[in-house]
Amino acid sequence: MSQSVSSFFKETTKPLTSGRRPWSVFLDLTLLNFPSSIHDTTTRITQNFFHFSVNYSIILLIILSLSLLYHPLVLIALFITLIAWLSLYFSREEPLSVLGYQVSDWMVLVVLFVVDFLVVIWGGVFQNFVVGGGIGVVLMLLHAGLRSTDDLVADDIETSPYANLLSDDDGDYNAPPTGGL
């Protein structure tokens, strides 16, 4: 039984964590510098959020868990809802059927959000949750705004399914076009 449960969670979380970037790249202090403009800041935030989305999610979950450390029953209840999220929303490939009726993904999403909200209200930790989430968002915005994105372009091109379309065969990107009209 425990073998099948652990293999279920390994298989379920594998696609979720496959987008996680190495922590050494995420925490590289040599790439932290101030952006040159507001446009540069928003570009960095957007690119870093897309590139490091799994890393940011992990950090946010850790901060939220720490903000609920003195409320173990709420942590246990939220862990149970996390299991529900993994099994009912993230790991399903076929539609969910309850009592012979097909339940849409939208309905599953709404029910899981309502259950999470009720657990937070039941536990009386709404303020802890908001403060912890706020701290996590501020830290993510600081990191995303200060981390240079110069090294991300090459990584994204290499891992892109369109990499062969983004490069030319000669590898010379600055060569002027040849031939005439």
Image (cartoon, rainbow, N blue to C red):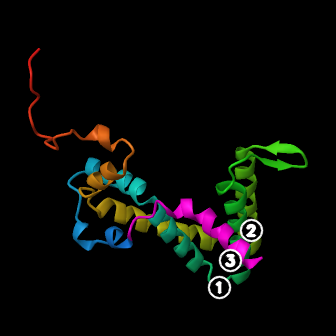
Q: CA distance from mark 1 to mark 3?
A: 9 Å
Q: Quarter holding the C terminus?
A: top left
Give the magenta-colored segment's residue range: 1-22
Residue on which disc 1 sits: 70
Q: Amino acid at mark 2?
A: Val
Which of disc 2 and disc 1 is earlier in sequence?
A: 1
Q: As drawn, is 177 to the left or to the right of 49? A: left
Q: Taking the image as drawn, is residue 93 in sight?
A: yes
Residue placed at 36% from the left, 41% from the top? 162
| Front position in the image: 75 or 131 | 75
Which of disc 3 and disc 2 is earlier in sequence?
A: 3
Residue on which disc 2 sits: 119
Q: CA distance from mark 1 to mark 2?
A: 15 Å
- Expressed as whole percent of the image width and height from the top left, the position of residue 132 reads 54, 72
Spot the residue most to the right.
Answer: 99
Q: Residues within 10 Å of mark 3 (few under 14, many from 20)?
A: many
